[in-house]
Amino acid sequence: MNKHHYCLIMAGGVGSRFWPMSRATHPKQFIDILGKGITLIQDTYQRVSSIVPKGNVFIVTHESYKDLIKQQLPDIPDDNILCEPARKNTAPCVAYASYKIALKDPEALVLVAPSDHLIKKDKTFIRALKACYEKAASEDCLITIGIKPLWPDTGYGYIQYKESPVKEKDPRIGKVKTFTEKPDLEMAQFFLQSGDFLWNSGIFVWSVKSIIKALETYASDVADLFKEGQKYYYTDKETKEVEKIYSQCKNISIDYAVMEKASNVYVRSSAIGWSDLGTWGSLYQQMEKDKDKNAVVGKNVMLFQSSKCIVHVPKEKLVVIEGLEDYIVVESKDILLICKKQDEQQIRNFVNEVKARKGEKFV
């Protein structure tokens, strides 16, 4: 295993579209949402541990989730848990981790991965990562994992790519031409038919030198803050300094801050059985289904004249459902949600209404 291989797992999100199972105090990355016996972040950690030394795995999360990280990933050293005092999107968390990892290992090659995505084909994913690590080690570049689109999804970002200007060892690596964020259906259908667009997975590989250079070039206002704070990292003054930095830092994604501006961005096309598990509908697509196309998590669910539903309930709960088609039925603790699948984008609005009418207890 290469001692310069590192991984940054991003685990600070709230996952409000998976309410009521995902709550502000216990979001979806810390839940066994697939019924596999392990949580999403544990699954992610196990996957990357086959290519990254355990001591080189870093987690960036909101400070309120530090105890959850320590409970679910007890092997992670305290210095490798980077706690954000505020949610400022992905560019600040990448900058913070990059400058901190650079202190430990200036030759680091870093995989950046969300904590709550589904990857079904682990071996294929590891092969893709090895190719990306090798390219990142040999040249100044930023690489993203692209997923061959299977349908015209309007909830994903898209990457247009072309043949690489250099001869690649891995022919699946191409040069990024454009990024498009969440197109309408007509545009998504065009992207699918054209054959030169991939879904943007939000998974990246680069050398720590390359990403710091890119941050200082394209997002200097973000980079300057974390570079200035670098002298406090790995000291007892780090927490206070990071609080100061985040109070000044703007909210911006790494895509907008760097990836869409840089000229040295590449994509590795991959078929890894990927889903960002962004909604109940996306989870439904990934789950096994019965003869009536129902996807069920829960050992005591009885369905009658019901089809195309996703049901996620506690295993000890007896649930009897009759006459539903294309519905989401989810019970979590003291909340039951019944919602049409086609209206799942309204779940965030439901959460806001619940918060306004019933207070923080239920969100």
Image: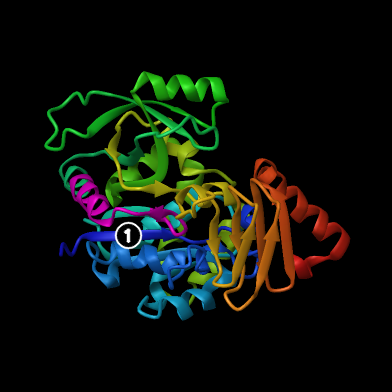
* Side (left or right) of 239 relative to 54: right
Quarter the N terminus occupies: bottom left
Q: Residue at x 24, y 57 (%)?
A: 108
Q: Amino acid at mark 1?
A: Cys
Relative depth, front residue between 23 and 152: 152
Q: Position of residue 37 (x, y in %)?
A: 43, 73
- Colour setting: rainbow
Q: Is residue 166 magenta?
A: no
Q: Residue at x 25, y 30 (%)?
A: 174
Relative depth, front residue between 240 and 320: 320
In this rendering, the answer to whether 332 lies above or below 124 is below
Give the SS element for disc 1: strand
* Side (left or right) of 24 relative to 227: right
How many marks on residues? 1
Q: Is residue 234 visible?
A: no
Question: Where is mark 1, residue-wise?
Answer: 7
Relative depth, front residue between 2 and 275: 275
* Side (left or right) of 217 relative to 362: left
Quarter the C terminus occupies: bottom right
Relative depth, front residue between 222 and 54: 54
Q: Position of residue 173 (x, y in %)?
A: 23, 34
In this rendering, the answer to whether 31 lies above or below 200 is below
The picture quadrant where one finds residue 195 is top left
Name of the residue lying farthest toward the front: 305
In this rendering, the answer to whether 315 lies above or below 228 is below
Q: Which residues are magenta?
A: 113-132
